Structure formats: C-alpha cells, structure tokens
Image (spheres, rainbow, N blue to C red):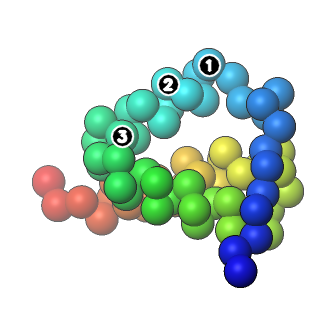
Amino acid sequence: MARIRTIKPEFFTSDDFASVKRFVEQLGVEPVLDAVEIALDSSVPDRAVFKYLCGVCWNKVREVPE
C-alpha cells in the first residue's frame, strides 16, 4: 500500500504555486502529477519536498525536445 504523506500548507508560498503553474504550462498536467508523486514518495524532509518537486520538473523540462 502506498504511503500517505501530508505536507503542511505553511511550507508553500504563492510563488510556489506560480512555479507549478509554469511547469504545467511547459510540461502538461500528467508529467507534473508524476513529478508530485515522485517528490511525495521521496525520503526528503517535508520542508524540502517542493524543492525536490521543482528538481524533478526541471529534469523533465530538459528531456523535452525543442
């Protein structure tokens, strides 16, 4: 069974949500949702999950052919 992880809202800012919006615009919803799952399943501390998510998304952006 998958582990359920809850991240406290105070770990996120409005700039974070703007970043997610930009990733969705660049990659689409499904790849960003995949990145969210990867970040939430990681062993990084809760405060670092968003930064980890951004790293996963940037790796996906670099994989997209121009």
* Secondary structure of residue under mark 2: helix
C-alpha distance separating marks 2 and 1: 6 Å
Which residue ends up furthest to the left in the rendered image?
A: 66
Instruction: Name which residue lies at 72% across and 30% down.
Output: 12
Q: Nearer the viewer, residue 7 or 16?
A: 7
Q: Earlier in the sequence, mark 2 or mark 3?
A: 2
Instruction: Name which residue lies at 68% across and 60% down.
Output: 40
Q: Position of residue 48 (x, y in %)?
A: 77, 50
Name the residue that disc number 2 marks.
18
Query: At label 2, which amino acid type do we have?
Result: Ala
Q: Residues within 10 Å of mark 1 (few under 14, many from 20)?
A: few
- C-beta proximity under 8 Å, tags 2 and 1: yes
Query: At label 3, which amino acid type do we have?
Result: Val
Q: In this rendering, is residue 55 above or below 2?
A: above
Name the residue that disc number 3 marks.
24
- C-beta proximity under 8 Å, tags 2 and 3: no
